[in-house]
Image (tube, rainbow, N blue to C red):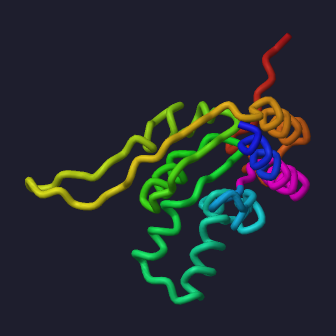
């Protein structure tokens, strides 16, 4: 578990980078053969694109690199099957499904994601398997092992810092806030 803590510490550094840049503080690293090969932090505010989660940022770096090396889809799939992801917060439903489709080997996360978690909190997309259609099995998402609670307190502390400072990019309320009479 020492290796998991060391990689999670690197993911927490990515989350701190996100926090320093007024993003929701989520960070991740992707590891192959005991070596970090990609990292990412949330960039949803900077890009104004709600899909730019830390996991998607790290995945896109690898896809560009591997495709630039001329790897075809089966080889890219083989590479992802040897990779583990360390992320400070449980992947959301979108990211959990993307990781399943890519065939990631294992995911380690810090704190649970009680609103959008796709690895057990809301849905268990990491337990997906091939789908049956018209009596024929077709390739589909692959399951992956998930381990949560690694350095969760540190991840939660970053979220607290973010919400205490306020999110300057949060949408303004559509209705005026009413103050109850005293």
- Answer above or below: position of 58 versus 114: below
- Residue 126 location, quadrant: top left
Q: Residue at x 60, y 53 (%)?
A: 84
Q: Is residue 178 left or right of residue 120?
A: right
- Answer above or below: position of 112 versus 70: above
Q: Residue at x 62, y 34 (%)?
A: 148
Count up the numbered dots: 0
Q: Residue at x 54, y 53 (%)?
A: 95
Q: Which x, y percent locates residue 113?
A: 62, 35
Q: Residue at x 89, y 35 (%)?
A: 164
In the rendered image, residue 129 lying in the magenta stretch gets the answer no
Residue 41 visible in the snapshot: yes
Q: Which x, y percent locates residue 15?
A: 80, 50
Quadrant in the picture for the N terminus: top right
- Answer above or below: position of 45 versus 107: below
Q: Which x, y percent locates residue 4?
A: 71, 43
Of 60 and 77, nearer the camera is 77
The region drawn magenta spans 12-28
Quadrant in the picture for the C terminus: top right
In the rendered image, residue 14 lying in the magenta stretch gets the answer yes
Of 180 and 28, nearer the camera is 28
Furthest residue toward left: 135
- Residue 20 location, quadrant: bottom right
Furthest residue toward top: 182
Q: Is residue 166 left or right of residue 81?
A: right
Residue 24 visible in the snapshot: no
- Residue 153 location, quadrant: top right
């Amino acid at each position: 578990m020492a290796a998991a803590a060391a990689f999670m510490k690197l993911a927490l550094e990515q989350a701190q980078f996100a926090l320093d840049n007024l993003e929701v503080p989520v960070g991740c690293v992707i590891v192959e053969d005991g070596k970090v090969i990609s990292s990412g932090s949330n960039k949803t505010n900077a890009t104004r694109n709600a899909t730019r989660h830390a996991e998607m940022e790290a995945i896109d770096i690898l896809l560009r690199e591997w495709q630039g090396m001329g790897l075809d889809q089966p080889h890219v799939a083989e590479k992802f099957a040897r990779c583990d992801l360390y992320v400070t917060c449980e992947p959301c439903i979108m990211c959990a499904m993307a990781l399943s489709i890519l065939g990631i080997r294992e995911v380690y996360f810090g704190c649970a994601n009680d609103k959008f978690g796709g690895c057990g909190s809301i849905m268990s997309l990491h337990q997906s398997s091939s789908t049956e259609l018209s009596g024929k099995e077709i390739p589909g998402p692959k399951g992956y092992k998930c381990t949560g609670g690694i350095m969760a307190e540190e991840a939660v502390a970053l979220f607290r810092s973010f919400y205490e400072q306020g999110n300057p990019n949060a949408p303004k309320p559509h209705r005026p806030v009413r103050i109850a009479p005293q």
